[in-house]
Image (spheres, helix red, strand yellow):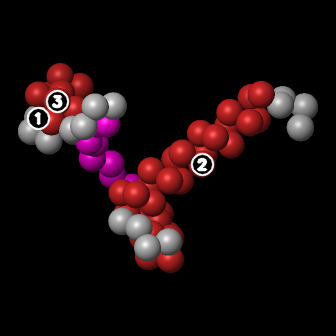
Amino acid sequence: MSTGYQAAQANGTKGECREGRVRHTVTMDRVVFEAVRAGAMRNRRSVSEEIAARLSASVASREVQIANPGS
């Protein structure tokens, strides 16, 4: 595991990605990965695109819950 400073200095991280994008390595359970991979294949996306889509949906859902706490 690297520190935040080491990660910021590494090749292929924030400094080399497009504006507003950050490249990050994630370790996940194999079962979770297989579920994400299956979803990616169904949706004709890469695993990274599937993760991004799921995270976006999760954030949007959370924002709706915060905006409508009684719902």
Residue 16 appears at what percent x and percent y?
15, 36
Of the image marks 2 and 1, the number of the one nearer the N terminus: 1
Amino acid type at circle 1 is Ala
x 89%, y 37%: residue: 71
Q: Residue lying farthest top?
A: 5
The residue carrying pointer 2 sits among few (fewer than 14), some (14 to 19) or many (20 or more) residues within 10 Å by Cα, namely few
Residues at marks 3 and 2, CA–CA distance in whole angstroms: 26 Å
SS at badge 2: helix
Q: Quadrant of residue 10?
A: top left
Amino acid of disc 3: Gly
> Up-down: is 7 above or below 47?
above
Provide the residue designation for mark 2: 57
| Magenta span | 21-28
Residue labelled with disc 3: 15
Closer to us: 27 or 13: 13
Q: Which residue in the protein does label 1 denote?
A: 10
Q: Residue furthest front?
A: 19
Q: Residue 61 in the image: x percent, y percent?
A: 68, 43
SS at circle 1: loop
Q: How packed is label 3: few (under 14 Cα within 10 Å), some, or many (20 or more)?
A: some
Q: Amino acid at mark 2?
A: Ala
Q: Answer yes or no: is residue 3 visible.
A: no
Is residue 27 inside the magenta stretch?
yes
